[in-house]
Structures are given as structure tokens and as C-alpha cells.
Amino acid sequence: MKGLKKVLAVLVSGVLAAGVCACGPTEEKAQGETPVITWYVPGGQQSDLSSVLEAINKITVEKIGASVDLQIVDTGAYQDRMTMMIGANDDFDLCFTSDWINIFSRNASRGAYLSLNEMLEKQSGLKDTVPEYLWTAATINGEIYAVPNVQMEFTQTSLCILKSLADKYHLDTDAITKVDDIEPFLEQVKQGETGIYPIKIGLSLFTNPIMEKISETQIAIRKDTGECVIYCEQPEYLASAKTIHEWYKKGYVRGDIASVTDDSQEKNAGKYAVWEEQYKPGAEAEIKARLGGKEVVLIPVEEPYLKANAGQPAMTAVGRNAAHPEKALELLELVNTDKELYNLFAYGVEGKHYTKNEDGKVVINQEGGYTLNSAWMFGNQFNADIQEGQDENVWIETEKMNNSAQRSPIFGFQFNTDSVKTEISQIASVVKEYSTMDLGAEDPVPIYDEFKTKMNAAGINTVKAELEKQLDEWKSGK
């Protein structure tokens, strides 16, 4: 892998915190050389990535005097790869970071990313492309550590269903208002289909409409009361775990789920009848392209909601030891303002990786060798050309929903985890140990009390107390 240095010492716990502070950004290369900006993102491997990069670099070399080396790492391996690179002090320039993979709050608080404050003052064009409220999500202790990718910022948890099966079994989508309502359909799929798993599911599908989890803490805010609570102690947690286990026993959840580490290829191949997605205008067309042309139906199970950390689900950070930090920011400004360049990242080369129909909408060539279809990973998605099946006003409608979504009662709050990092690490270990409850592979009832006991021993109440303290200070300072 380009940009990956040899690790000369065995990595031990704590190397992340120690290693990232060891040195500053690598000095720029000698004058006359064209800087190469390395950019890491998660996704499936693309057989014709080289053609896309050739087209991208024609633009970037001309406009900012730098080329791009886009490193696409399999989604299932991305978290571990970035943890290893950060811990080994490797000098990548840009990386995708979020609240769900390559965790922003953890990495930024430990010094893995460069502060962008000074550089953004010089790159005012980039700063102006992002709404002010999103910069809050990228800020820790007054320092901006990432550039939010403008896109759908609200969340609206939804059931995603293969349309072919919904049609075959005459699914009444209007009758589905909560997750449990899908069970009769799952039974039909189980009885009538071979080679298809009825559902891919986790606790979040049930609990997202009820609670807003705070980053990695296992603390949540109840949407109905605004109360700060311990996630696993809420009645909906155990009730949902019981339901998932019942579905597992009935054969709706795949039998080997406990050992599956990355099933993205199976999902994209249509091996699941139902799974979780986030609704947004035009989502069906994007998912169809990702699934090789298979149509889907989305059924929201909650109202649009703007979380406290809206913006964190998709951001781009500059590595602490970036070889070309200034050029990296120039590249991000260009990607966010140059529609031609942005659409190369999003769809590849027109005429090769996609065409446009008579309405001027993008039609993905599934055999073209570039079907990443993850425009939201690179920058302002409102610059993306509209895909076949999307409404002409898709970006206008998305922005309207961003502005009208119900806001979290703690919207704009950022939890500083510095004083409870040890507890959060211990809590994560316990959650991993009992992950079978989330997957349905084990009956939660016999192990639930033991799980809560271990969470208490790991320090969950200490984390809750610190969070409540900071919330009180934040509220008093508003």
C-alpha cells in the first residue's frame, strides 16, 4: 500500500496517543516536484480507478499543481487500517472520518488530525462552502479538525426493501410504521426464497427512533424527554434485543451472523431482502446504482432528526503528519467548488463509467469498472449531477429537510472525552464482548444482568456523570 511506512516496533496499547504527537507535518518535497496527495476512503475495490485518477489529475495538476493518489480500502478493513496508520505515524494527507468509522472524536482528541484553523483562514473559499452549524461538529476545544461534507445532514432511519420481493409478496408499505410491522414479510421471504436472507438487522434499527446515542459513550439522549440516560439500561434496549433474537431463531437473521465481519458485497448483490438505510430525497436511485440496478423501496420508521453532532457522519480530515497539508486543503476547496472534478470522484469518466440519458441524468455503467457511488464521501454532494430516478429538485429538497428537521435538544454540543478515555475504552471492550446481543445470535435474557454489571465496572456511570456535567456547563453558557 502506497504511503504505508514499515512499522519498526511492535504496536502496544497507547501507541495511538503517543505516536501521533511525535512529530509535525512532513516537510514539502523539493521545489519542482509535483506533490502527490494521498487520500484514504472506505469502499469496494474499483477495477478502473486508474482511468478516473488520470482524469482527476489532469484537472488538479493544472489548477493546484498537485496530483491525487486515491486509496480505496475495503469498508470492513478501513477502521483497522486507519488505526494502524495513525498509530504508526504514517504520513497520509487526507482521510474519510466520521462518527461511525475511523471515529472522528477519538482521533481528533488524541491528536491524529491537524488543526485547520489557520489554513482555513487562507482557504476562505472552502470555509464558505460549509454551513456554519456544521463546523461546530468538526470543532474540539476551539480547533477545527475536519471539513464536513455537505450532504443530507439529518437522519431518518428506514427499512430498505428489495422492490422485486416487495412486489412479489404484495407488501403494503403504507401499513409499515414501525420495524416490528415487517415480520410477516420476513416470514414470506423465508418460506418463498432461497439464497436470500430475510433481514440484516441490529439494535440501532429499533432504538434510533427513540434515542440519540452520544458518539462512543453508550450514553444516549431520549428524544421524547431530552433526558440523559445509559443506553443499555433503557427498556427498549432489552426488548429490541429479544425481538432480534426471536427473529434469529425463526431464521430471518442469517445463522452465521456472529462470525460475519464484512457483508457489503453480499448486500450489494441483493442477498438481503431487508436492511437499514437512512432516507433522503433520491436515496432509492443511489442505492439502485450501488446494487447493480436492483430497485428498492424505502420506508422511514422515524421523522427527520438533526443530531447533536450533525456533520460528523461524513467528514474529511488532514493527517497529523500530512506531507502536503496546504495542498490537501487546496484540493478539498477544489473538490467542493469544481463540479467537473467532484463528479469525476462521484461517478468516474463520462462515456466510460456512466452515460447521461435524454433528460441529462446520470446512468451508471455497472460494467464500467468504477461504481463506487459514494459521492457523499468526497465533498459537497449538492454538486453531484442528478442520477436517473432522482427528482430534478433532489438537492433543493434535501437542503429543505436539513433546515426543517427536528433538532436534538443538545444540538451543537460536543462531548470532550479526554477525562474519561480509559472508561470509554473499557466500555467498548464490554460492548464488543457482548455483541451477540446486538446481532441476535444469543438469547439476551440470561446474559443481560451480567452485561450491565460489566458496564458498571467499566465506568459507564463515570462517563454519564462527566457528560451531564459538561451538558450543564454548555446549557448555562448558551
Image (spheres, helix red, strand yellow):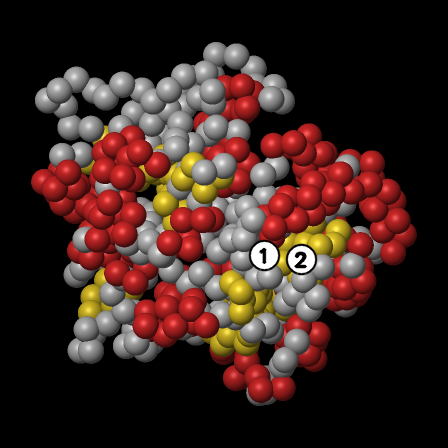
The x, y position of residue 50, in whole percent, is 23, 42
User: Given the image, on which type of amino acid does mark 2 rest?
Assistant: Ile
Q: Residue at x 19, y 36 (%)?
A: 67
Q: Residue at x 37, y 24 (%)?
A: 321
Looking at this view, is 238 or 235 the one in front? 235
Q: Evaluate if marks 1 and 2 touch, with contact meaning CB atoms under 8 Å apart.
A: yes
Give left or right: position of 422 versus 154. Answer: right
Give left or right: position of 374 versus 194. Answer: left
User: Given the image, on which type of amino acid does mark 1 rest?
Assistant: Ile
Which secondary structure lies at badge 2?
Answer: strand
Between discs 1 and 2, the one toward the N terminus:
2
Looking at this view, is 233 or 70 the one in front? 233
Q: Residue at x 41, y 17 (%)?
A: 23
Q: Nearer the viewer, mark 1 or mark 2?
A: 1
Give the image quarter of residue 415: top right
Q: Residue at x 40, y 49 (%)?
A: 135
Give the image quarter of residue 421: top right
The residue that disc 2 covers is 221
Looking at this view, is 357 or 152 the one in front? 152
Using the rendered image of the protein, determine whether residue 380 is visible from the camera's viewpoint. Answer: yes
Assign the N terminus to one quadrant of the image. Answer: top left
Give left or right: position of 305 versus 428. Answer: left
Q: CA distance from mark 1 to mark 2?
A: 8 Å
Which secondary structure lies at badge 1?
Answer: loop
Above or below 325: residue 88: above
The x, y position of residue 305, in whole percent, is 54, 66
The residue that disc 1 covers is 410
Above or below 105: residue 205: below
The crowding category of the residue bearing disc 1, from other C-alpha atoms within 10 Å (few below 14, some 14 to 19, many at least 20), is some
